[in-house]
Amino acid sequence: MKTYHSFLFAVLFAMTVVSCGPKPVDQEEIANDSISNESAEAEEQRPSPLEVKDGTVAGKAFKVQYGSPAVKGRALWGDLVPYNVVWRTGANEASYVELSEDMTVEGKTLSAGKYSIFTIPKETGSWTVIFNSEWDLEHGHFQYDEENDVLRVEVMPEWVEQNQERLSMDLENPGLVIRWEKLVLPITIQ
């Protein structure tokens, strides 16, 4: 009987030690955490950081998301960004806007929804601004399809003396204002 108690005590002691020790490692959880951390680190290390601006335009909820490239001393207009060719208006994946309600863009109706935004820069005169129904394009203008254009408007660019290193899209008067290098492209949205 004494042997039985000694054996039972040893088993209980061993179970207590094991249950108080470190928990087994879940390899799948570690892999998922690694992927999540790598994604976050990659996002932080993007040469053209992802920007999101949430706010209102003409009293209606409006959101814009875009990759914000830097000039880095490069010649932009007519070189890095060619004239008369569809440009994704940002970097990496396609930039997009999200409208909570129907709005007018340069006097033309754009229904509530999400739209990728592209431009066609021109050496002189107005630029074409395009809203396309395919808003979730991983490779920007490389996947652009004109057949999915919902609205095209003409907008006159302004050229200023002050240089803006990073591309920005701001929700301000007259609606959405795109700035990069010496360009200011004010898109009227109501």
Image (spheres, rainbow, N blue to C red):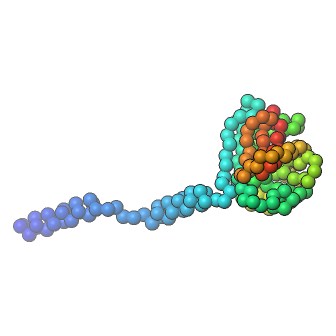
Image height check: is 59 above or below 38?
above
Residue at 84 percent across and 46 percent down: it is 159
Q: In this orientation, which residue lies closer to the viewer: 188 or 77? A: 77
Report x, y in % for residue 157.
86, 45
Image height check: is 140 above or below 127?
below
Report x, y in % for residue 10.
16, 66
Q: Quadrant of the N terminus?
A: bottom left
Left or right: 71 as drawn, with respect to 85 = left
* Res. 140 image quadrant: bottom right
Q: Quadrant of the C terminus?
A: top right
The single residue placed furthest to the top in the displayed view is 59
Image height check: is 129 above or below 189?
below
The single residue placed furthest to the right in the displayed view is 125
Residue at 39 percent across and 64 percent down: it is 25
Residue 73 in view in this figure: yes
Left or right: 185 as drawn, with respect to 29 = right
Residue at 73 percent across and 30 percent down: it is 59
The single residue placed furthest to the bottom in the displayed view is 3
* Res. 15 image quadrant: bottom left
Report x, y in % for residue 2.
6, 67
The single residue placed furthest to the left in the displayed view is 2
Q: In this orientation, which residue lies closer to the viewer: 181 or 56? A: 181
Report x, y in % for residue 52.
67, 46
Residue at 75 percent across and 60 percent down: it is 73
Residue 145 in view in this figure: no
Q: In this orientation, which residue lies closer to the viewer: 145 or 117? A: 117
Q: Number of callouts in the render?
A: 0
Q: In this orientation, which residue lies closer to the viewer: 166 or 189? A: 166
